[in-house]
Amino acid sequence: MHIRVASVTYITFPHSMSFYFRSMETSKQTHWETIYQTKQPNEVSWTQVIPEMSLNLIKQLNLPKDAEIIDVGGGDSKLVDFLIDQGYTRVSVLDISQAAIDRAKIRLGEKANQVTWIVSDILDFKPNKKYHVWHDRAAFHFQTEDEQINRYLNLVQDAVSGNLIIGTFSTEGPTRCSGLPIQQYNEESMHARFAAHHFTPLPCQRDNHITPSGGSQNFVFCVFEKKY
């Protein structure tokens, strides 16, 4: 297929659009591998010494210790450290970057064997179990196209049996992260997105995350309960 641009330039696209999407996925993975291979935790904006908001929201759910919990886009976040120390026995961490996962494993030492580690782009993830809690402070707001957002929503609709905890940049937060565009949300737009996919919205909370460099990033955290 050829598309004419102006009067003299032609751009040729591959016959198979799957090639295009594979190239995008490879580019995303390369981006995040480079970040985690070249930067330390104190050099990236998302680092938290203690993920207090996430821990508090999970605690409020009064989960059994054998609940299936997944941290989507967990990277080398310390949320998994705290969950293990609190006695949760079925914790999974998903990230697109192998380097991020490896860093978390090294930090945890022998405790890493208690975790299910998944290296995948979230949109390629094919869960083989249902999750009581799906926690995501890192991946959802990078879905900026309608097709990406709908794929994510369909995924959680099928994969979650209990609760969603979604933290995204708010409408008062950044418009980019790590050089990439993000989708901002407020409480109303978050509720609208997930209510249409069989999730009952619970109250949202705002969180001003202080970055290692001293900046402030406003997040909106929303909890949802699966409807049956």
Image (cartoon, helix red, strand yellow):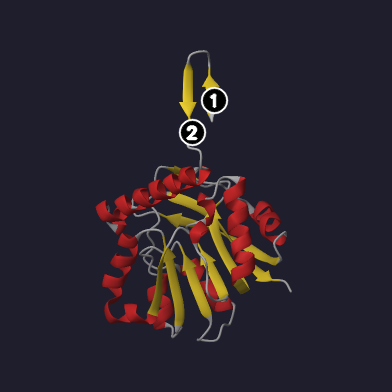
Residue at image x 63%, y 60%?
154
Does residue 89 appear left or right of residue 187 in this picture?
A: left
Q: How many marks?
A: 2
> Mark 1 and mark 2 in contact (Cβ < 8 Å)?
yes
Q: Residue at x 30, y 60 (%)?
A: 99
Around disc 1, counting alpha carbons within 10 Å, would you say few (fewer than 14), some (14 to 19), or many (20 or more)?
A: few
* Residue occupying image coordinates x 47% and y 37%: 14
Instruction: Residue 151: give its label.
Output: none
Does residue 225 sit above or below 90 in this rendering? Answer: above
Instruction: Say which amino acid is labelled 1.
Output: Ile
Q: Which residue is mark 2?
A: 13
Please state which amino acid type lies under the numbered disc 2: Phe
Quarter of the image where the N terminus is located: top right
Query: Residue 112, position in %: x, y?
Result: 33, 77
Q: Is residue 223 in view?
A: no
Q: Is residue 148 above or below residue 157?
A: above
Residue corresponding to mark 1: 3
Side of 107 relative to 67 (left or right): left
33 relative to 13, above or below: below
Alpha-carbon span between mark 2 and mark 1: 8 Å
Of 214 and 167, nearer the camera is: 167
Question: Which image quarter holds the C terminus?
Answer: bottom right
Give the x, y percent position of residue 188.
Answer: 69, 53
Disc 2, SS: loop
| 35 or 28, nearer to the observer | 28
Label 2 crowd bin: few (<14), some (14–19), many (20+), radius 10 Å: few
Which residue occupies the foreground of this view, 183 or 92?
A: 92
Which x, y percent locates residue 191? 68, 58
* N-term mark: 2 or 1: 1
Q: Secondary structure at mark 1?
A: strand
